[in-house]
Amino acid sequence: MTTFGLVFSQSVTAFDVKKYQSLLATVDRELSVLDTDFSAEYVIQKRDPGGAVSSTRATIFRRDAKNQFLVLILEPTIDKGKGYLKLGDNLWLYDPVGKTFTFTNARDRFQNSSFKNSDFEPSHLSRDYKPLSAERTKLGSYDCTLLELEAVSRDAAYPKMKIWISSDNLVRKREEYSLSGSILRTVAIPSYQKVEKKWLPASMIIIDHLQFKSINGKVEYERTTVTVSKPSLKSLPDTVYTKDYLERVAR
């Protein structure tokens, strides 16, 4: 009797890291302004678990080509004149009362909201992360590529991340994780606005999974809504990105 052995071979396609690293670089280019400056007004509204609401209005000036930004707080009145200045790797907080500059961290919460100081920066996904997996999925009405990312740079804001990238190369959602895999923040970007030839965020919704309370048997998380208005790509003088300028406009 002859025994026939059947051998089944399965074709396994290797994950194309270069393909998705290139996608991250494309996203970075879409969300960065490298040939001029970017300025806008941000309204950052935080809702605490249970309902207390606080709001901050600020003007931002950003020069992505040199990794610089300046943020000037306009409201509330008690914080008016405070500012942040980032030059390369250095980030200072300016206090107009004491007229002092102190070093601060890009990972710190901006005005005690779920918005971080690093959220003012342009996208650095291709520099800070490598893709581990990819899949096609739907996010609302958007056809998206969902990437799982792992940090490869000390400048990365989070050790792990998942991002949903729509077919127009815009990030529609991020989930940010600790090294152990615990979710820290969810960031949704429901709308973008076209400024000349660039698409830039018009609004963001941030859920902080570390700030929560159980209210009437239901868990509520801190929720921060960011609205970006008056965007401009007008070139700005070099003097804008200096301590002297921040001190002068903060008066």
Image (cartoon, grey):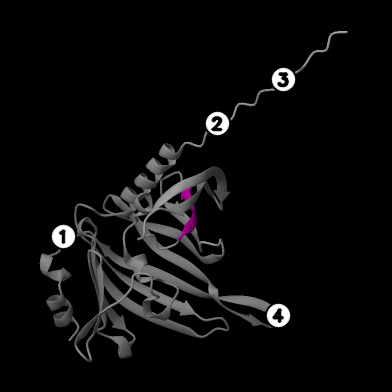
Amino acid type shown at disc 3: Val
Secondary structure, mark 1, is loop
Amino acid type shown at disc 2: Thr
> For the residues carrying marks 4 and 1, which lies nearer the camera in this image?
4
Tell me the residue that label 2 is attached to.
13
**How many numbered marks does the figure carry?**
4
Q: Earlier in the sequence, mark 1 or mark 3?
A: 3
Which residue lies most toward the front here? 1
Residue in the image at 28% along x and 63% along y: 231
Residue in the image at 44% along x and 83% along y: 54
Q: Earlier in the sequence, mark 2 or mark 4?
A: 2
Magenta residues, start to end = 159-165
Against 222, residue 125 (above or below) is: above
Secondary structure, mark 4, is loop
Residue 107 part of the magenta-drawn span: no
Amino acid type shown at disc 4: Gly
Residue in the image at 88% along x and 8% along y: 1
Secondary structure, mark 3, is loop
Give the Cα separation between the discs numbered 2 and 3.
Answer: 19 Å
Mark sitting on residue 7? 3
Tell me the residue that label 1 is attached to.
235
